[in-house]
């Protein structure tokens, strides 16, 4: 059983690199961003609520996101492990995840934090916004708010996982293949 967290600011390459890790290690991908966008596309009450926050670049309330992850874990009891992409994003979410995994006796093995310069993040997201249709990628002020929210609410999680000896910084600058190789090397050591 291997449980990994892919961590980093918006545009750091979490979704991109998750695809490589899933193939290499046979894990189930749980991206809260993708799950929320699925709820929005299906126009569910949860999606309509989440959209109000996502359109402004704010975090969706913890209880909404934790409930969604809880459901997905319950639906995948036979999995080899999970890659949590974009989750947890607050200390409350991290504590809830630890509790859910403790019940299954399958703790997090490592939290992999992709480090990328701010201007590179903005360039990547504006570039994706040209084709993705994601409104949160099309406006520089919303992107900058997402990066600010990351520094205020999400980056303190590095200390949370460092205290458990589970925090690993990965250089997220360079080509997608170069970064995938760095991640692969770290995960192979677990
Ligand atoms: P997410 O969907 O998680 O979006 P993200 O942070 O932008 O990361 P993503 O994985 O999509 O992008 P990537 O860096 O791979 O979250 C969106 C919103 O949902 C949040 O703002 C929040 O409102 C809400 N939300 C999600 N989870 C939540 C939670 N747990 N709690 C509360 N709210 C939550 O890639 C970005 C771009 O860079 C892509 O176009 C990619 O092709 C490109 N790229 C990647 N690597 C590259 C490289 N090496 N070189 C050049 N380009 C690269």
Image: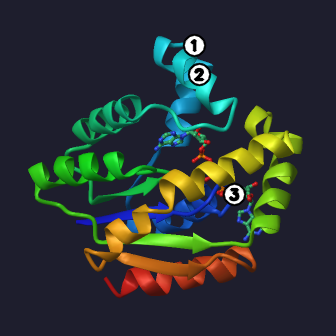
> Mark 3: is the Cβ under 8 angstroms from ligand 1?
yes
Q: Earlier in the sequence, mark 1 or mark 3?
A: 3
- Closer mark to the observer between disc 2 and disc 3: 3
Q: Closer to the observer: label 1 or label 3?
A: 3
x then y, percent, for residue 41: 62, 21
Q: Residue at x 80, y 33 (%)?
A: 133
Position above or below: 25 against 123: below
> x%, y% of residue 99?
17, 49
Q: Is mark 1 within 8 Å of ligand 1?
A: no
Residues marked 1 and 2 touching at CB (< 8 Å): yes
- Taking the spot 76% from the left edge, 50% from the top edge, the residue there is 144
Q: Say which element carries label 2.
A: helix
Mark 2 and mark 3 lie on one chain; the one further toward the N terminus is 3
What label sits on residue 11 in the rendered view? Answer: 3
Q: Is residue 185 above or below residue 131?
A: below
101 left or right of 61 in image: left
Screen quadrant of the C terminus: bottom left
Residue 40 is marked as 2
Q: Label 1: how many residues lie within 10 Å, few (<14), some (14-19) or many (20+)? A: few
Residue 62 or residue 137, whichever sits in front: 62
For mark 2, does the 10 Å Cα neighbourhood hold few (<14), some (14 to 19), or many (20 or more) residues? some
Estimate how packed mark 3 is, as few (under 14), some (14 to 19) or many (20 or more) residues with alpha carbons within 10 Å.
many
Residue 141: % across, % down: 82, 43
Separation of marks 1 and 3 at Cα, in angstroms:
25 Å
Tell which of 104 and 23 is nearer to you: 104
Which of the labelled discs sits on residue 25, or is there none?
none
110 on left or right of 22: left
Colour approach in the figure: rainbow
The quarter of the displayed image where residue 42 is located = top right
Q: Say which residue appears at 50% left-offset and 13% top-offset.
A: 44
Q: Which mark is residue 43?
A: 1
Q: Is residue 114 visible to the viewer in this orientation of the structure?
A: yes
């Amino acid at each position: 059983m291997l449980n990994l967290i892919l961590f980093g600011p918006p545009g750091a390459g979490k979704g991109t690199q998750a695809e490589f890790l899933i193939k290499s290690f046979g894990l189930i991908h749980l991206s809260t961003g993708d799950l929320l966008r699925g709820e929005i596309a299906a126009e569910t009450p949860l999606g309509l609520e989440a959209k109000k926050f996502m359109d402004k670049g704010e975090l969706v309330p913890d209880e909404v996101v934790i409930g969604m992850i809880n459901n997905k874990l319950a639906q995948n009891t036979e999995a080899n492990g999970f890659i949590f992409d974009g989750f947890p994003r607050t200390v409350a979410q991290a504590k809830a995840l630890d509790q859910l995994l403790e019940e299954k006796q399958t703790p997090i093995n490592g939290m992999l934090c992709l480090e990328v310069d701010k201007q590179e993040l903005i360039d990547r997201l504006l570039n994706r916004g040209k084709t993705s249709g994601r409104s949160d990628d099309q406006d520089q002020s919303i992107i900058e708010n997402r990066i600010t929210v990351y520094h205020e609410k999400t980056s303190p999680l590095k200390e949370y996982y460092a205290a458990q000896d589970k925090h690993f910084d990965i250089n997220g600058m360079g080509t997608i293949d170069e970064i995938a190789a760095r991640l692969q090397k770290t995960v192979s050591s677990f």
